[in-house]
Image: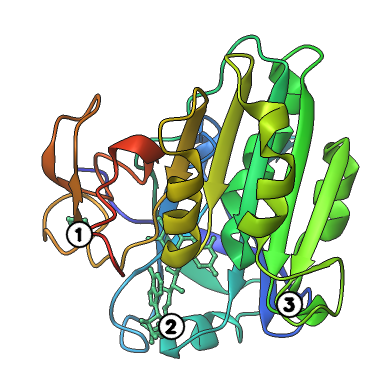
Amino acid sequence: MKPYISATVFSQRETVGGHFLVVLKVSDSFRESLPGQFVMVRMKSCDQPFLSRPFSIYSVYSHGKNTFLEILYKVVGKGTEAFSRLREGDILNILGPLGKGFDIPSECDKIVLIAGGVGIAPLSFLAERCERDINGAEIVCYIGAGSLEALVSLDRIEGICSVVKISTDDGSWGHAGSVTELFRRDMELYMDNDSRIYSCGPNPMLRSLNKLLKGRPVACQVSLEERMACGIGACLGCVVKIKSGDVGGGLVRVCKEGPVFDISSVDYSEHNG
Ligand SMILES: Cc1cc2nc3c(=O)[nH]c(=O)nc-3n(C[C@H](O)[C@H](O)[C@H](O)COP(=O)(O)OP(=O)(O)OC[C@H]3O[C@@H](n4cnc5c(N)ncnc54)[C@H](O)[C@@H]3O)c2cc1C
Ligand code: FES
């Protein structure tokens, strides 16, 4: 079993209201991190909060001899509130990279990303790698949030993707409504073997995407965000029901067999979170 290791906060800033970008100086072992993989993070002084928290890897890069890992997160409770007070030089404990990442094809015409809120974090890392590794693929991103103020990572994603389409629930920017509605208008453009769809966001959003894509001839992978305690397959706190697929059917651990699954294999009749 991998041990937690120390990581130093290199920088931290609030990007948009209640969302933070923290850059950690980490060991070289994180260099091989893949899009869709995640890390478990806990404060060095382990009382507040005492449990670790899972976060997708937003980016990993090397500069000189150092390796840096970025996490983009939204403050929602005790743990993330404590993380938001971290300052340059503070030390965290970090475990990873964990889980199974997205499958990236060597060739593909269109990469389609569908993100809800901070679900953009693993998809932005995926976009970076697709841009670097797949020759000539068009990368299109559909990104949704509650309002303009909650749209995160726009600058970065606009720098990578050839097309970025935006929706907000309150209509303060882009399409007024859900990101899956926005995607539905264009979806016939992507229903072929030369496109790949990837999505991350709240479960209701993934459930409606699943309905849209049911029986359609396109590959789609989703990253699930269950609550996690251990992150390494030991506590069974993150199990979901899977219909079938390369990890088999039945109950699987999101932290170990996932967090990335084919959308068609997730049993949304059970997975209602
Ligand atoms: C694989 C994975 C990757 C993730 N990546 C990111 C990321 O890149 N950025 C980010 O902001 N968040 C991400 N999350 C969610 C993040 O882990 C939680 O927001 C965080 O653990 C909340 O901790 P807290 O102590 O602040 O909140 P808590 O006090 O524990 O909970 C506050 C509220 O948040 C809800 N909540 C807690 N955990 C989750 C969860 N896993 N999914 C949905 N709702 C939750 C609780 O139900 C509660 O309503 C990810 C989760 C997983 C499993
Ligand atoms: S979080 Fe413990 S088994 Fe997945």
Q: Is mark 2 within 8 Å of ligand 1?
A: yes
- Residue in view at x 51 percent, y 33 percent: 34
The residue beneath circle 1 is: 270
| Amino acid at dot 2 | Gly
Q: Is residue 134 above or below residue 13?
A: above
Closer to viewer: mark 2 or mark 1? 1
Task: Looking at the image, tell me whether mark 2 or mark 1 is earlier in sequence order.
Answer: 2
Task: Looking at the image, tell me whether mark 2 or mark 3 is earlier in sequence order.
Answer: 2
Q: Position of residue 156 (x, y in %)?
A: 83, 51
Q: Position of residue 258 (x, y in %)?
A: 31, 42
Give the structural element (helix, strand or loop) at label 2.
Answer: helix
Estimate the spatial distance between the alpha carbons at disc 2 and disc 3, rounded to whole Å: 20 Å
Of residues 165 and 123, which is closer to you in this image? Answer: 165
Estimate the spatial distance between the alpha carbons at disc 1 and disc 3, rounded to whole Å: 29 Å
The residue beneath circle 3 is: 150
- Residue 60 visible in the snapshot: no
Estimate the spatial distance between the alpha carbons at disc 2 and disc 1, rounded to whole Å: 28 Å
The residue beneath circle 2 is: 79
Model colouring: rainbow
| Amino acid at dot 3 | Ala
Give the structural element (helix, strand or loop) at label 3.
Answer: helix
